[in-house]
Amino acid sequence: MIIAIDGPAGAGKSTVAKILAEKIGCTYINTGAMYRAVAYKLLQIGGKFTEEDLKNILENISISLDKDKVLLDGEDISDKIKDEKVSKMASKIATIKIVREKLVEKQRQMAKEKECVVMEGRDIGTVVFPNADIKIFLTATAEERAKRRYEELKAKGFNIPYEHLLEKIKERDKIDSTRKIAPLKPTKEHIVIDTTDKSIEEVIEEITDIIKKVNLEKIN
């Protein structure tokens, strides 16, 4: 079974997908972390690259996802890829065809090796697995998503102005939704869930009910 969870930054995809996967006994795959890993690698070489540089990196890079850990060529970069510079670079390279093709290939291979997968990102139900068994699209207002990010960073000791985070989220939304390659948007098969006024538990319960309903329909 493949459960696709898509949506914009800050909608709760990672937290929901991770807890959901554990609850129903599936493997959790964070595709956004893979783009961030490539972005981090590019920033390590100065942030400037040619198409040939990018091709070589994608052919030789090793990205492993182990629950909360993201390993790049064997190095744990889980915390390093949360940096704003990495986010910006990840959004930039996500518009490059060769990057998406290579990472989609890796994502499909990861899922192929598992019986049940909860995969989250921005194009899982549209590009990576258009025939996913269940497609969920999580969303929330930009203001609520900025607030969540602000509180998350504050808890870690970072004091970044809320207004700055809101601006960045709106900027990221515009880039993701208007890019030519795999723009961020739900399909008619996606079940859209607005998480603005819902707790993580409520969202997970709602998705769990959807999964039960789909499984019952398959049996009948």
Image (spheres, rainbow, N blue to C red):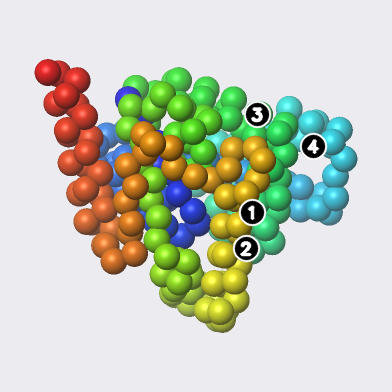
Work out whether residue 50 or residue 57 is closer to the camera in this orientation and state it.
Answer: 50
Q: Label 3 neighbourhood size at 10 Å, few (<14), some (14-19), many (20+)? A: few
The answer to whether the residue labelled 3 contacts the one labelled 4, judged by CB atoms less than 8 Å apart, is: no
Q: Which residue is drawn at the image coordinates 19% and 26% (left, top)?
A: 215
Whether 185 is drawn above or below 56: the answer is below
Instruction: Tell me which amino acid carries mark 1.
Output: Ile
Q: Position of residue 131 (x, y in %)?
A: 41, 24
Q: Label 2 neighbourhood size at 10 Å, few (<14), some (14-19), many (20+)? A: few
Q: Label 1 neighbourhood size at 10 Å, few (<14), some (14-19), many (20+)? A: some
Q: Secondary structure at mark 1?
A: helix
Q: Which residue is drawn at the image coordinates 38% and 51% (left, top)?
A: 138
Find residue 97 and report its image quarter.
top right
Instruction: Tell me which amino acid carries mark 4.
Output: Leu
Judging by the rendered image, the residue that carries numbered circle 3 is 101
How far apart marks 4 and 2 lie (CA) works out to: 25 Å
Of tags 2 and 3, which is closer to the observer? Answer: 2
Q: Secondary structure at mark 4?
A: helix
Q: Earlier in the sequence, mark 4 or mark 2?
A: 4
Apparent side of residue 51 relative to residue 124 in the rendered image (left or right): right
The answer to whether the residue labelled 1 contacts the one labelled 2, judged by CB atoms less than 8 Å apart, is: yes
Of tags 3 and 4, which is closer to the observer? Answer: 3
Judging by the rendered image, the residue that carries numbered circle 4 is 54
Of tags 4 and 2, which is closer to the observer? Answer: 2
How far apart marks 2 and 3 lie (CA) works out to: 24 Å
Q: Label 4 neighbourhood size at 10 Å, few (<14), some (14-19), many (20+)? A: some
Judging by the rendered image, the residue that carries numbered circle 2 is 171
